[in-house]
Amino acid sequence: MRISELSAITGASARMLRHYESAGLLSPGRDPNGYRHYAPEDAKTVHDVRCLLASGLSLTEAASMLHIVCGDEQNASAGEREAALVKLDERSRQLDEAIARLIAEKAGIQEIRSNVERNYGRA
């Protein structure tokens, strides 16, 4: 299938598909006229990559663990699986820190709002 077809099937733009290719996530063949030609299983790869990205992973992180998380885990080495778990734990810790920071910021905003209402009343 051509890039426009893969884009229509997956919802990823042609530009994004070319970006995935440059990151090594897709390896389309080429037609004699130079057009990219994607295999049917590339749609699953794009879906899996988008799922990993939506989970907060970077494209580099998604690329490094795509075959472990979304592929045949039996083909991943114990070291690869452990590295993926360490990376996922680290991202989870980062998210916990970000959530705590946002909760504190929200509390600060609410306190400022209360002070404005208390001192000046409601507009």
Image: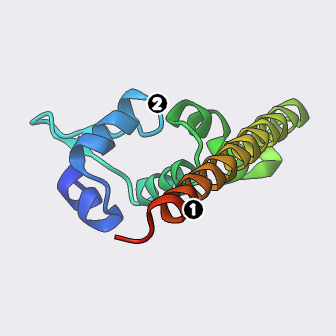
Q: Which residue is mark 1?
A: 114
Nearest to N terminus: mark 1 or mark 2: 2
Amino acid on which disc 1 is placed: Ser
Seen at 25% across and 51% down, the residue is: 13
- Callout 2: 10 Å neighbours few (<14), some, many (20+)? few
Count the labels in the image. Answer: 2
Pick the front one: 121 or 102: 121
Q: In the visual, does 45 lie left or right of 31?
A: right
Pick the front one: 79 or 50: 50
**How far across and down, in percent of the image, does residue 87 sit?**
76, 35
How far apart marks 1 and 2 lie (CA) works out to 52 Å
28 to 22, vertically: above or below: below
Element under label 1? helix
The image quarter in which residue 85 lies: top right
Pointer 1 and pointer 2: residues touching (CB < 8 Å)? no
Pick the front one: 40 or 60: 60
- Which quadrant would the N terminus be assigned to in this image? bottom left
- Regarding residue 71, the answer to whether it shows in the image is no
Seen at 44% across and 29% down, the residue is: 23
Element under label 2? loop
The image quarter in which residue 65 lies: top right
- Callout 1: 10 Å neighbours few (<14), some, many (20+)? few
Q: Which mark is residue 24?
A: 2
Seen at 57% across and 62% down, the residue is: 114
**How far across and down, in percent of the image, does residue 75 sit?**
77, 43
Amino acid on which disc 2 is placed: Gly
